[in-house]
Image (cartoon, rainbow, N blue to C red):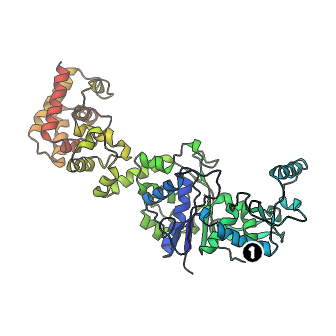
Amino acid sequence: MKTRTRFAPSPTGYVHIGNIRSALFPYLLAKQNKGTFILRIEDTDQNRFVADAEAIILDTLRWLGLQWDEGVEVGGPFGPYRQTERRDHYIKWAEKLIKKGLAYADPYTPEEVQKFRQAAEKAKKPFLYRNHRPENPPKWELGMPLRFKQTKIERKYWHDEIMGDLEAGAETLDDFILIKADGLPTYNFAHIVDDAEMECTHVTRGIEYISSMANYLALYEALGLKPPIFVHMPHVMAPSGNKKLGKRDGAKSVQEYRAEGYLPEAMLNFLVMLGWNDGTTTDIFSLDDMVKQFDLTRVQRAGARFDEKRLLWLNGQWIRRTDIAKLFNYAKDFWGENGQKATDERKLEVLAGVQERLKTLGDLPTLTEYFFTTPKIDLSMITDNKFLSRFSKDELITMLEVATLKLKTTEWQTDSLQEALNQLLTETARKPAELFSLLRIAVSYAPFSPELPRTFAVLGQAESLARLQATMDALHA
Ligand code: GLU
């Protein structure tokens, strides 16, 4: 059978790390089996609906390169792919159940149900709706909640590709709602209908759904459907490791990471390694590598800890590995005020100069503005510097003078610049932290910059020497 997997997000707000991992796993499963990856929008919960959330989901998936083969916007043989547009499908399946005596109208008001619940709590018993099943329910019609009727109260057994062989007791089976009073199906019902109609072979989702598995299995049986392969993914855990990752644990939405200058490659690499490795020490995986290597049997059952430092490290790695033309494209909206105005040719040169040093594209202005405009001289950056504060102004000027003399006759290329700088260390009898810090600050007045030879090379000889001179003049004044 051809592999068909799906990502079925609810448009309820921002896209988080955990959400997007729920897209990556089915994407990889589909791709490694030359199957189909489907995107279905589960928008039946009108209370949680957020207007632009769907657009954000689509945009995020495209940015990450997780293009779906079938689903919203691209279409396919089993559309529509937005649940609110599939109401008649759910009604059709609901009527089948009613006919078989496996679904019934819920005659109670929410207040009445609440009373049952309270009574159960008082008696210290778990609340089960099926204990209050009405004897003669009214004929169901749209506007009334429709419930599933559990007829086989028994223990359920099933297999999960990550979690292994599982079971759940009959006490977890209940008469859950299939169609709500607003006429829309619940997730519990809709996803089963859709997965069946869309011929999904795998259900890949968060572990929070595992507690409902007994109910789902009962419904598959009632509908006469063969259950798909289940893949429940462990939680992404907070950095502390003892609870599920939440907004308060510092995890930003994927859009925020994107806006800070994280690369999609780094994001995907980070996501795949949340609870998975390929059995070696390799930690850099492109999407193609993942398609080749990813293997569900190697996904940890325990939750994987969210470690933002690791994401930052991966981002630096990916910035270095990314082809300069592609990086230039990613960097488009990240330049500082003066960088933005420069020609593409100049920007490309500067970008190549700082590529090794960038951790996020958000660092671009700090790391590059001084290439595009003469920096404002701030002598305190020299006089307060921990390596330079012990020198008198005259000593600083002498260092700059000696350096200037040498650099005037140096061939302006990183190799020869490196060599000249090394010779200068001997000639001035200064340590690298001293001489190089001074030169670096004098040409950039930036908190950090690329290696000195590179900085000089990108600035050009005339500009570099002019800046050294300007600092000497300022120190003289
Ligand atoms: N709409 C569900 C969610 O966003 C999807 C769960 C599933 O993949 O079946 O959590």
Residue at the extreme top of the image, as rendered = 477
Foreground residue, 50 or 209? 50
**Residue at the extreme bottom:** 1
Task: Return the residue found at the far left.
Answer: 409
Task: Give the residue displayed 58% in from the left and 41% down from the top.
Answer: 248
Q: Position of residue 475 (x, y in %)?
A: 20, 22
Residue 3 found in image quarter: bottom right
Tell me what residue is drawn at x 17 percent, y 44 percent. 417
Can you see residue 329?
A: yes
Q: What x and y, as percent, mark residue 420?
A: 15, 41
Point 23% across, 42% down: residue: 455
Q: Identify the residue position indicated by label 1 in the image.
A: 96
> Can residue 160 be spotted in the picture?
no
Residue type highlighted by circle 1: Lys
Query: What is the x, y in percent for residue 404?
Result: 13, 33
Q: Please, is residue 432 above or below residue 116 in the view?
A: above
**In the figure, is residue 44 to the left or right of 129?**
left
Q: Nearer the viewer, residue 457 or 278?
A: 457
Q: Please state which of residues 454 and 207 is positioned toward the viewer in this rendering.
A: 207
The C terminus, quarter of image: top left
Left or right: where 234 falls relative to 449: right
Dot 1 lies on which element? helix
Q: Quadrant of the N terminus?
A: bottom right
Q: Is ligand 1 closer than 8 angstroms to the Cβ of mark 1?
A: no
Residue 153 horizontal/vertical position (percent): 84, 69
The quarter of the image that holds ligand 1 is bottom right
